[in-house]
Image (tube, helix red, strand yellow):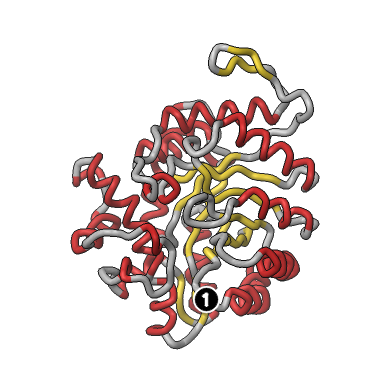
Amino acid sequence: MEFAITFKPDMSHSRLIALTRQAEAAGFSYGWIFDSHVLWQEPYPLLALMAANTERMRLGTCVTNPAVRDATVTASLLATLNQISNGRMDLGIGRGDSSRRVMGKKPTTLARLEEAVEVVRDLCAGKKIVYEEREIQMAWTDTAPPVWIAGYGPKALRCAGRVGDGVVLQFADPHLIKWCLGFVREGAEEAGRDFSKIRVMSAAPVWVSDDLEKARDHVRWFPALVSNHVVDLVSRYKPEELPEELTAYVRDRKGYDYLHHAEVGSSNAEFVTDEIVDRFAIVGTAEEHIRRLRELIAVGVTQFNIYLMSGDEEDTVEVYGREIVPEFLQD
């Protein structure tokens, strides 16, 4: 299993650089950053700083979307960062959530997502393409980044299977991940692709402590964040098409304030029960984290991505690097 971190870009650039360096030294192989340009700082300059201050760690957006920037702009950004980082950039992309909804706009379509992935790949690889009825080429680049597709519903997950090098699943629940991967496999098989080659990311916050009440309070914001996607799914699918384990907890949700998105202690999370916290995130002792991570490996997860935004980020990286990551590097 690979280990990764994701930053919410609301901290100082000096602290972000220090945390990135600390994580690379602790054995983390990926550094990701949220892309929500109104709520937080622009991710691409920060990715440039992360690239300039690391040697091995792969870097990318977790996740961007094809609506806030033209696909040709995203391609140019990634190709430039690939040169800065000596080829260490990945693209994480989805339909868009907070960066769209905070402006009163809806996520974009899967068709537009697939089209954007093809444009970014081809332009970064230096290919000539026809874009909006005009032939264009980025002749100065020749390397397409790996693409990770984020999704929850059957259609988005099949899309990930069709076109993704990896899939982003935002929870640490083995049962739900297994359900998701069934649709990823369907999409891969429909496209004649080898499902076993698709990498699987489980992304979630963590808190290492034997004080479960404190731990849960630090990560309760995360199921509230996920609930935005679940509410969207409930509006587009029949109840029998979605697992009860995913949808039941949003029935008591009163609403969501995107100005407090991914915020510890926000009232957005008041409806989230302890049981949901324990399933979606990983809390408890180091031994419990190791047990949960082995469950994720058993259902096919290849990368565990810590959403590093629950407070005491330096301590989380330190304890994972000392007590947890080495257990899996030995495997």
Q: Quadrant of residue 283?
A: bottom left
Note whether 106 is above or below 249 in the view shown: above
Estimate the x, y position of residue 32 in percent, counting from the top left.
60, 55
Q: Amino acid at mark 1?
A: Gly
* Left or right of residue 125, residue 293 in this image: left
* Left or right of residue 45, residue 300 in this image: left
Viewer-side residue, 34 vs 287: 34
The C terminus, quarter of image: bottom right
Q: Give me the residue at 63% from left, 30% from top.
A: 121
Note whether 223 is above or below 143 in the view shown: below
Q: Give me the residue at 53% from left, 59% from top.
A: 297
Q: Residues within 10 Å of mark 1 (few under 14, many from 20)?
A: few
Estimate the x, y position of residue 215 in percent, counting from the top left.
44, 80
Q: Give me the residue at 48% from left, 51% from top.
A: 38
Q: Give me the residue at 76% from left, 30% from top.
A: 141
Q: Quadrant of residue 11?
A: bottom right
Which residue does the numbered mark 1 point to in the structure image? 311
Mark 1 lies on a secondary structure that is loop
Tell me if I can see residue 130 in this picture: yes
Note whether 177 is above or below 157 in the view shown: below
The N terminus, quarter of image: bottom right
Estimate the x, y position of residue 264 in percent, counting from the top left.
43, 72
Estimate the x, y position of residue 62 in percent, counting from the top left.
54, 51
